[in-house]
Amino acid sequence: MRHTVVKTYSYQPLLYFDPLTDKTRAIFRPVVPVRLAYRHKLGKVSIDCLVDSGADINLFPADWGESVGINIKKGAKTIINGIGAIGVEAFVHTITLYLGSDISFEVAACFSYSQEIPLLGRFGFFDQFKSIIFKEKDKIVELDYNV
């Protein structure tokens, strides 16, 4: 019998340089700690990933994949286009993502040597949940998952 698990995560402050004020300030962003596994090798630590509704697919730094034994360049090569149509070379692999001890799922994810911020995208993350709710005033994100 399936049941629903709702996970709530607080937004985290990240430093942002505001060119309008010429000052650095904190901007709160929705992040979720995940662990990555590849071929039964589970990463030792959780990594805070940005929940990015504008990202089409999960995109992670290559060194994160290498830490669980992925030979990054053996994956299917693709170009991920972002803001300003700037392309980032990435390689696709099938991995398992873990959110705590009660949620895990196998997904496709891209790994890039040019990417520093781990992104959770619409294909491979958002599509795994019944709903994802951003509560801006409360600075939390809620993930509704059927286990």
Image (cartoon, rainbow, N blue to C red):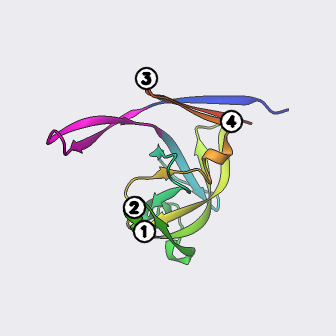
Residue hosting label 3: 137
Badge 1 marks a residue whose secondary structure is strand
Query: Residue 69, relative to residue 49: is it above or below?
Result: below
Q: Earlier in the sequence, mark 4 or mark 2?
A: 2
Residue hosting label 4: 145
Q: Residue 47: in sight, yes or no?
A: no
Three-letter amino acid code at the position of disc 4: Tyr
Q: Which residues are magenta?
A: 11-31
Question: Rounded to the nearest whole Å, what is the CA distance between mark 3 and mark 1?
Answer: 33 Å
Q: Are marks 4 and 1 in contact (CB under 8 Å)?
A: no
Determine whether, in the image, residue 23 is placed left or right of residue 66.
left
Question: Rounded to the nearest whole Å, what is the CA distance between mark 3 and mark 4?
Answer: 23 Å
Question: Rounded to the nearest whole Å, what is the CA distance between mark 4 and mark 1?
Answer: 31 Å
* Residue 13 locus on image (x, y percent): 33, 35
Q: Residues within 10 Å of mark 3 (few under 14, many from 20)?
A: few
Residue that appears at 26% across and 41% down: 15
Q: Are marks 2 and 1 in contact (CB under 8 Å)?
A: yes
Q: Which mark is residue 115?
A: 2
Question: Rounded to the nearest whole Å, what is the CA distance between mark 3 and mark 2?
Answer: 29 Å
Residue 146 part of the magenta segment? no
Question: Rounded to the nearest whole Å, what is the CA distance between mark 4 and mark 2?
Answer: 28 Å
Q: Earlier in the sequence, mark 3 or mark 1?
A: 1
Quadrant for residue 96, please give it: bottom right
Residue hosting label 1: 88
Three-letter amino acid code at the position of disc 1: Val
Three-letter amino acid code at the position of disc 3: Lys
Question: Rounded to the nearest whole Å, what is the CA distance between mark 2 and mark 1?
Answer: 8 Å
